[in-house]
Image (cartoon, rainbow, N blue to C red):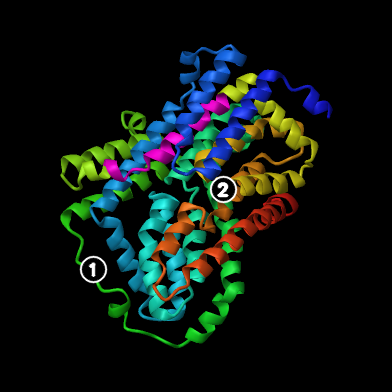
Amino acid sequence: MEVLAEISLAAWMSMLALAIVVIISCVNEDLNVGFLSIAFGIIVGGIWVGMNGAKVMNSFPIGLFMILVGVTFLFSLASTNGTMEKVSSYAIRACGGKTALLPLIIYVLVSILTTIGPGNIAATALMAPVAMAIATRVGMPAFLMTLLVVGAANGAAFSPFAPTGIISNGIIAKIAPQLPAIQESWTLDGLAWKIHFNSMYCQGFVNIGGFLLMGGWAWMARQHGQAINIDELAPRPEPFTSKQWYTLVAILLLIIFVIAPALPGVKDLIPKVILPLIANVGSVAFILAGILMLLNAADSKAGVKAMPWGVIMMVCGVTVLVEVMDRSGGLNAMVKMIGVISGPVTVNFWLGLLTGIISAYSSSSGVVMPMFLPLVPGLAKEVPSADVIAMISSINIGSHLVDTSPLSTLGALCIACAGEHEDKAKLFSKLLIWGLSMAVVGALACVLFFGVLGW
């Protein structure tokens, strides 16, 4: 009660504005809460915080916006010219017709596709039709295939090349100056990969374990030794065109230019005139996308239309409102409320649970991450022995494990692509129960891996 009594009116109003945004995002997916957040930020800032509209709009994260635009545009070009679809087709054929290997092939393929840049939503949209068609052909329940596809996509979503990873890393870069312990031990690039791998093994443990326990192990046992015609399962696609080869080279260069400077000693070997051009993944993506446009390797108009503008604006808009909350004392109030019920280990449970519950009905990367990640510096002070990287990972993982739910874009994509023989109402119910249960399971996984084991 003492904590509540210390909260100012400005802080209460900023938290109320954020609560309204979260509630609206849960009940009306057609309304972009990014624009609404900016409007609320201007109102709260102007009336209670002493910030005029211009100052509030100066909080717009232009750097994060440009990185997201650059990367998503490059991969929109790769998708619209058919490059990513052919990569998927060739990869599926790697199982050689051995049906028992299909779960492994699909999980690894979706993980790789997500990691190299398209992100979890794009990778799921690309693979769901193919994966569900394969599930129908080999007699695998659509529920199990959904666990594989969505689980792999979300597990790899925090790659430094993928939109969700870019959002996470952009917010972390902003709060890093308040976290001296991290700056002493990690570079931002190294931290980005650490968080990515935390997500992959934690979500992989939960999703692969769930697949095996919910019938996947029994299905694989029945398929042992069986094979089907690979050309019937996944017909050989046409060879890559010159435009698609250009695109593949561009994606490879993106990966090289982002990874190489982070390797020990490599940065010193790169000409100084080149270093400003590859300052971050967004700048590299813009250059490569521009080259592809000049080579007429893809339809730029189609690429622009395919970009996730709604999510980009959602992230940036909520970030503006969170900045107003910070100025008003609202973030500090939320930190204190979470700190009251948390210890160094249990804080990971509460962060995983709270983000999971909200994310089940709202946007994981567009609302939940911009809302919770800025709390980490305050929680590091409020719960002094808590591990900062563990808290970041708990927020990221808790907010994404629930996305198998049909209320999320990923779960809905898989239901839409399920075979005609599937009872979609029953599939909806099973995925809903699974997704909602992941709020608790995710919290337990976070406290186990990052709290108890300290990984």
Q: Is residue 288 left or right of residue 407?
A: left
Of residues 364 and 15, the one drawn nearer to the viewer in this rendering:
15
* Residue pictured at 54% horizontal, 56% vertical: 200
Residue 146 shown in magenta? no
Q: Nearer the viewer, residue 216 or 265?
A: 216
Q: Which residue is mark 1?
A: 237
Q: Is residue 322 magenta?
A: yes
Give the magenta range.
Answer: 304-323
Q: Amino acid at mark 1?
A: Pro
55 up-or-down from 365: above or below:
above
Label 1 Cα crowd, 10 Å radius (few <14 / some 14-19 / many 20+): few
Asked if residue 384 can be seen in this view, the reply is: no
Labelled disc at residue 113: none
* Separation (CA) of disc 2 from disc 1: 38 Å
Question: What is the quadrant of residue 96 in the picture?
Answer: bottom left
Relative to 20, say whether 429 is above or below. below
Where residue 30 appears, as percent x and y from the top left, is 44, 42
Q: Residue at coordinates 27% horizontally, 62% vertically from top-left?
A: 86
User: Where 319 falls versus 57 (above or below)?
Assistant: below
Q: Secondary structure at mark 2?
A: loop
**Amino acid type for the residue under numbered disc 2:** Tyr
In which quadrant will I find the N terminus? top right
Percent across and percent down for residue 23 are: 58, 39
Residue 320, x across and y down, in percent: 51, 26
Look at the magenta stretch and give its main secondary structure.
Answer: helix
49 to the left or right of 286: right
Crowd tier of the residue under label 2, counting other residues whose Cα lies within 10 Å: few below 14, some 14–19, many 20 or above:
many
Q: Where 76 falls versus 209 (above or below)?
A: above
Q: In this orientation, which residue lies closer to the viewer: 159 or 362?
A: 362
Q: Which residue is mark 2?
A: 361
Disc 2 versus disc 1: nearer the observer = 2
